[in-house]
Image: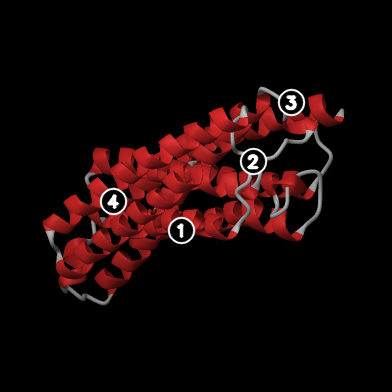
Amino acid sequence: MNAFFLKLAALFYLAGSLSYLAYVVFMSEKAVSAGRFSLLFGFGVHLVGFLMRYFEAGYTPITNLFESLSFFSLAVVGVFLVVERRYRLKVLGAFVSPIAFILILFTAFLPSEIQTIPPALQSYWLPIHATLLFVGDAIFAVAFAAGIIYLIQERQLKRKKLGPLMRRLPPLDVLDEINHRCLTFGFPLLTVGIITGAIWAEYAWGSYWSWDPKETWSLITWLLYAALLHGRLTVGWRGRKAAILAIVGFGAVLFTFLGVNLLLPGLHSYASFGR
């Protein structure tokens, strides 16, 4: 039954993506309202499906690629709804909602059966560690979208193209502020997520850090965002450089989440297609 709610949520996320894209093309306020409603309703349906799977499985369903993609998508939509409510950036939905839809779409090609989880995952650290990281990654997804919009808007301004697209895009300083806010909220979550993961690793495998591929790439991702935060606070990195690093950082997030799990065998291989 939880799979049905997941598919229904995917339809609402698709509707939300198309509605926000329609706003970019036609500048229709009705499209924005439809997009916001679709994402909000889809988030509610998705959350119900997640809770149903939780009670059916008896554990927090973030243990394999199917469940992780689903939860990541849920977190992206949840974070976006909060940011959109705070900043009222309509165009942001045209860049964030497709990310959520693509993530949940991939789950349709993955096994969805509930199985007995490995002993290493039978721990209260699972929801703590995974939730911190996925919410942090969702915040970085919004920063990624803001970075893309920043580069587009900057290019429009440099070429002095004062066309319809420019009127839809927010000012550069607002986009840079979103980038900064996402970094200040996302980086602590990433940091605590890695720390709780190390504590969990010691409990499960007897070592806080074993240079597993997932651990190594998590550290690389952390260093990228640490460099961006340090640069903003001490060197004054703003604007284009910060936007580019936010894009690169989210690329590292995706590789850590998907590339490592699917391409590099290690202790975290249970999160791949099979388990």
**Residue placed furthest toward the front:** 1
- Nearest the viewer among 152 and 123 is 123
Q: How far apart are marks 2 and 3 (CA)?
A: 27 Å
Q: How crowded is mark 2: few (under 14 residues within 10 Å), some or many (20 or more)?
A: few
- When asked about the image quadrant of residue 248, the answer is bottom right
Residue underneath mark 1:
241
What is the C-alpha distance between the residues marked 1 and 2?
44 Å
Mark closer to the chain start, 1 or 4: 4
- Circle 3 sits in a helix, a strand or a loop, which is it? helix
Q: In which quarter of the image is residue 118?
A: top right
Say what secondary structure mark 2 lies in. Answer: loop
Q: Residue at x 62, y 27 (%)?
A: 58
> What residue is pinned by disc 3?
199
Q: Which colour scheme is used?
A: secondary structure
Discs 4/3, front:
3
Q: Residue 114 carries which label?
A: 2
Residue 268 image offset from top left, x and y in percent: 75, 44
Rendered location of residue 73, percent (x, y):
47, 48
**Disc 1 residue type (three-letter):** Lys
Q: How far across and how far down the image is residue 27, in percent?
A: 14, 64
Q: How crowded is mark 3: few (under 14 residues within 10 Å), some or many (20 or more)?
A: some
Helix, strand, or loop for circle 1?
helix
Of 55 and 85, the residue lying toward us: 55
**Labels 4 and 3: the sequence-earlier one:** 4
At label 2, the amino acid type is: Ile
Separation (CA) of disc 3 from disc 1:
34 Å
- The reply, left or right, for residue 72 in relation to residue 176 is right
Q: Earlier in the sequence, mark 2 or mark 4?
A: 2
